[in-house]
Image (cartoon, rainbow, N blue to C red):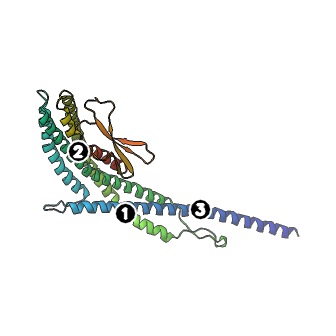
Amino acid sequence: MAGEVEKAQEAKAAVESATAKAREAQQKFEETKAMVEDAKKKADEAAKKAKELQQNIKTLRAASKTPGAVRGGIAAIAAAQIGTLKGAIAAQILKRVIDMLNKFSSGCPNNKELQRIIKIRSTLLKHLTSFEKRVNVFAKIANQLLLIVTIINAVVKIITSIPVPTAIIPPQTGGVGVPQSVLTKYSQGLVKVNKKLDEFQAQAAAITGVVNTVGPIITSLKDRLNSIDLAIQQCSINQPADLTQILATAQPPTTATNYTYKGYTLEIIQDPNSPKIAPRRYAIAKDKSGSIRLRGDSSFSSDTQVLLDEVKFRIDNQLA
């Protein structure tokens, strides 16, 4: 009798031990499964970003297929296109800016000359904004490259941290392990992609280097154009007889007061801190709730389209 009780207790203990091991194995399986699913999610995200990047690069390559087109990676295209535009900006716009500044060296230009300077300044600002947009395309590509690298590195880390063996749940519990073939498939794919990581990082660094050389030039030109704007405003105040015509050139009337762009409402606002006789204006962007999310620079001589283009560019950067 005692022997039967002892055997029953041993059998019970064996069952409890097997059950505990099964529960532990089930828990490990669930953890491993979650890690694989997380890896798949991140891999899919990387694939989506890579597809978007490929489309952007394809568009840029198509745009560069001109006589003497650039060969090489996207960094080479960035260097060629930005370098060419930067040269044109530095040689042409800077010369025009200096010429206009010289007009104020010995006093205020007459009414006709001021109107001419206002129109030239607006044209230069439009060219400068267009140049910034082109540069911004390459900056976004560099960010996409780095994002893909970050995601892939995260996937690699997940895959390499998954415990092996992966199918250790006792058959009697009904559990099924993660097939080794799944991890093998991921690992093989990641090995191929992983070889591209250094290339992606190098391309991103090269593009960023080219983009960074443009920033100081754009900032310098904008500062000079802003100084011209202030000079025009001051001269306008000093010429009350011609102020109406000067204002008509600097701030032409428009039939619309509100504009929309990518879900934002854009408005032109008169700067309350500017002189009433020669007021400055700036553009703002409001979200759906009516809150002001972005504000452009205040200007006397910039026309409405220039003010709007500046805020649109900032919206594009914010949504990047």
Where residue 62 sits, quadrant-wise, is bottom left
Name the residue tied to disc 3.
Answer: 28
Decide: few, some or many residues near mark 2? Use Cα within 10 Å; few <14, some 14-19, many ≥20: some
Please tell me which of labels 3 and 1 falls first in the chain. 3
For the residues bearing labels 2 and 3, Cβ distance under 8 angstroms: no
Instruction: Residue 120: give x, y in percent of width and height.
Output: 16, 42
Please tell me which of labels 1 and 2 falls first in the chain. 1
Instruction: Residue 256: give x, y in percent of width and height.
Output: 31, 47
Closer to the camera, 118 or 45?
A: 118
Q: Which residue, as the protein is rendered here, is positioned at the far right?
A: 1
Report whether 201 appears left or right of 11: left
**Residue 289, label in figure:** none
**Residue 193, label in figure:** 1
Name the residue tied to disc 2.
Answer: 214
For the residues bearing labels 1 and 2, Cβ distance under 8 angstroms: no
> Mark 3 falls on what kind of element?
helix
Report whether 278 appears left or right of 145: left
User: Is residue 251 at all visible to an observer of this figure?
Assistant: yes
Please tell me which of labels 2 and 3 falls first in the chain. 3
Mark 2 residue type: Val
Mark 1 residue type: Val
Mark 3 residue type: Lys
Closer to the camera, 129 or 211?
A: 129
Q: Distance between the residues labelled 2 and 3?
A: 53 Å
Where residue 297 sits, quadrant-wise, is top left
The residue lying at 46 percent from left, 68 percent from top is 184
The residue lying at 32 percent from left, 34 percent from top is 271
User: Is residue 297 at all visible to an observer of this figure?
Assistant: no
Report whether 1 appears left or right of 310: right
> Mark 1 falls on what kind of element?
helix
